[in-house]
Amino acid sequence: MDDITIIEPKKGWQLVDWKELFHYRDLLYFLTIRSIKAKYAQSVLGVGWAILQPLIQTVIFTVIFGNLAQLSSDGIPYILFSYVAMVPWNYFSNILSGSAGSLVTNKNLLSKVYFPRIVLPLSTVFSALIDFGIAFLVLIGFFVYYQFIPTWEIVFFPILLMILIMTSLGTGMILSALAVQYRDVQYAMTFMVRLLMYGAPVVYSVSIIPDKYLYWYALNPMVGVIEGMRSAFLGSKPLPWDLIGIGALVALLLFLFGVFYFKRMEKYFADIA
Amino acid sequence: MMSETVIKVENLSKRYRIGLEDKADTFAEQLKNTFLYPIKNIRKIAQMTRFDKEDDSIFWALRDINFEVKKGEVLGIVGHNGAGKSTLLKILSRITEPTSGKIEIRGRVSALLEVGTGFHPELTGRDNVYMNGTILGMRKKEIDAKFDEIVAFSGVEKHIDTPVKFYSSGMRVRLAFSVAAHLEPEILIIDEVLAVGDVEFQNKCLGKMEDVAGQGRTVLFVSHNMEAVERMCDQSLLLDSGNLKDIGTTYEILQKYENVRRQNFKLKHEWIEDEGLFELEGITLVSIELINDNHGIPRCIRVRMKYLREVGVVPMIQLFNSKRIKIMSSVCSVRHENHNDIVEYDLELPLESLIDGRYFINLSLVRNGNQRVLRFSELLNFEIYRPLKRMDYMEKNLPIVKLRDDWSINTNL
């Protein structure tokens, strides 16, 4: 027999067991399917909500911030300006809140069966992808309607996406491990996401931030991601590589810390969930 | 030739921190607690993962467990509630980590602590089969290959594409069990909670497990159900308060378990001095006791009391089973109330008619045959247990009692 399992207390910081995670890739797949199907089950519009939610949000922002408050949108129709930001923002907040709650929501699994726990927060990256993809198609619709042509710089889009995923997943993993022990995290989550949104240039332009604070502001990786999206898709400005660079560094640190912290706390999950 | 060791457990220990409750005696204290609540809470919750200070809230669920399991062995794990069975199971199945010690397992392990883990009510039976199967560690292609078999075994073919929230609980359990039954591990770890549902289903589970055991696989089986252990396991392991009491043949272990269990029964209750004095009711209670016959089977319940004056009060005995179903209730029909004499009431009962299980006795005192003046709940508790005797195991629903039954045949008509 070749399968030998050693069970003993793990000390200190652990690495992710990639081989094992690969073995459980089918579980990752079905968890993703489960949350997608369960999310839209028994709703009349079903996946239609993935179109409506960001759209309605954008319309509200356009009325309040674009028309009433007259916020600058760098010369771009406000609705387009804010929708381009809304698409990555919603993906970010879906991964963040989904992964942060993933352990508590599935605590019955944690105490009944073994599997690499990291599969739970990880699967939200994939299940939120559906909404993201649909919102993205609507974005293309906007481009057709406003006859906008994205710049060649959209080739850098995957980099922006990576920053987004690393930030949200990294933070989500830290929060999920905390939420197992401190349920307060769940309650603070909604208002935290809202706060983060106003800390990123979703409804306003980054040009209102004074230059001397700009790099501090860019410590929020979503600043680089959203401004990058605007530059790449709307061509309002050249790609802000400085903002993106700072964001990427923070994202990487958050992600690495998230993974290690999650692995460190993992052994307590079943006992305290 | 010695057979191969597939599970080796060395010095295994596990501790938990259990919550300590704060108690408030006064309103002011309660008010103070309310304001200090967050501060106390953060300390308390943070402590769940800290073990630097040894105090009352640390609880050792397992201490220094050592044993080995050979290939093909079917090992029963028995013990009371809280003896550490579930903890051992959770460590073996890697759900939780041991505090110290080491386990070496050779071979592919499947652990079944419940059926239908991961089932989602909104998903169809088909989706849930895949969900549950992959959670139990199967690969998608394995499930693909066995899918038809799984569905056929469950008998829900017609509804396989219906969301399981529309299933009856029986259908759900059948489908879930059917997935579990098609796992093909080299080592199977199962909890008795698996055997939920009706007795017929339990038998089906046990039958399937016996098949697994028969195929030369190694099985670890945790149970309260002595008959199931006896039926399935050749070797057993007895846990008591986190310690490994003994390991050996199931027959020996069940005998020992029986002795450990006996220590928890309360077969006699005595009122010490004034405790039993009920001035208003005019009596002093002395004792209540269960009297065994020569074979150790309870035969009679004896109540001793003293009358302070003539009050017309007599004992009433009630017998409840472990589900707190009243099996019997009886008011004493004889009276003797001489001042200051100790009176001994004996209630003889055919307790051999009780099926195996735990029983509780309540004592009440009644006036004029129907007016209850005092009541004591669960003063005594005992167990009827017929070691290693199979009784009515195949019966679908066990009766509450088993009355003496004598069949006879008469052909000279």
Image: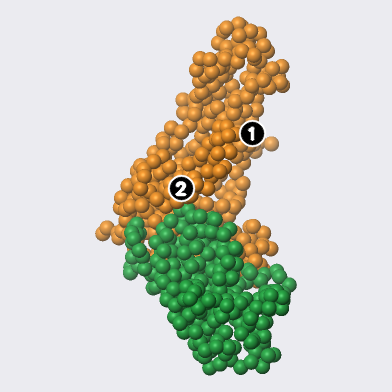
The total of numbered circles placed on residues is 2
Q: Amino acid at mark 2?
A: Arg
Foreground of the two, B362 or B61:
B61
Q: Amino acid at mark 1?
A: Lys
Could you classify mark 2 by the number of other residues whose Cα lies within 10 Å: few (under 14), some (14-19), or many (20 or more)? few
At 41% from the left and 68% from the top, the residue drawn is A257
Q: Give the spatial CA distance, label 2 vs label 1.
A: 46 Å
In this figure, which residue is indicated by the disc labeled 2?
A: B43
- The percent position of residue A198, horizontal first and vertical second, equals 59, 70
Determine whether B70 is above or below B373 in the image.
below
At 43% from the left and 56% from the top, the residue drawn is A268
- The percent position of residue A263, horizontal first and vertical second, equals 41, 64
The picture's colour for chain A is: green
Q: Quadrant of the C terminus of chain B?
A: top right
Q: Which chain is orange?
A: B
Could you classify mark 1 by the number of other residues whose Cα lies within 10 Å: few (under 14), some (14-19), or many (20 or more)? some
- Report the residue that reaches farthest toward the right: A44
Choose the circle earlier in sequence order: 2 or 1: 2
